[in-house]
Amino acid sequence: MKISYNKLWIKLIEKRISPATLRKDLSLATGTMTKMRKNEEVALSVLLRICKYLNCNIGDICDAVNTEKPFLKI
């Protein structure tokens, strides 16, 4: 499983908030933003701060994506 933050980037566009503004307003480290751009895991506390800032649920900003092949039953 991997994480995808595509929903976050879409939500920021919808709310007309730049990633730089998000980073500044929440005092996020540049490394954290880089991890999110690369769809890498970040701390749950960071995701919850983003949710509070955007007034949304965690499922509104990220998805768990299955990257493994499903088992085939024969």
Image (cartoon, grey):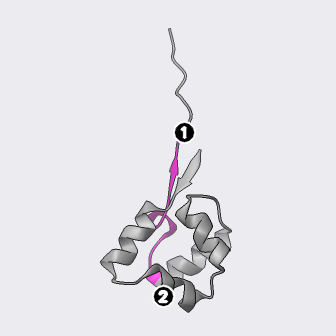
Identify the residue position indicated by label 2 in the image.
21
The Cα atoms of the two marked residues, 2 and 1, are separated by 31 Å
Helix, strand or loop under label 1: loop
C-beta proximity under 8 Å, tags 2 and 1: no
Q: Residue at x 53, y 41 (%)?
A: 66
Circle 1: is it few (<14), some (14-19), or many (20+) Cα within 10 Å?
Answer: few
Q: For the residue marked with disc 1, what is the amino acid?
A: Thr
Q: Residue at x 53, y 65 (%)?
A: 37
Q: Quadrant of residue 39?
A: bottom right
Q: Nearer the viewer, mark 2 or mark 1?
A: 2
Magenta range is 54-66
Q: Position of residue 8 (x, y in %)?
A: 44, 69
Q: Residue at x 60, y 68 (%)?
A: 34
Identify the residue position indicated by label 1 in the image.
67
* Image quadrant containing the N terminus: top right
Q: Closer to the N terminus: mark 2 or mark 1?
A: 2
Above or below, 29 against 72 in this view is below
Q: For the residue marked with disc 2, what is the amino acid?
A: Thr
Above or below, 3 against 31 in this view is above
Above or below, 72 against 25 in this view is above
Q: Position of residue 19 (x, y in %)?
A: 47, 79
Q: Residue at x 45, y 81 (%)?
A: 54
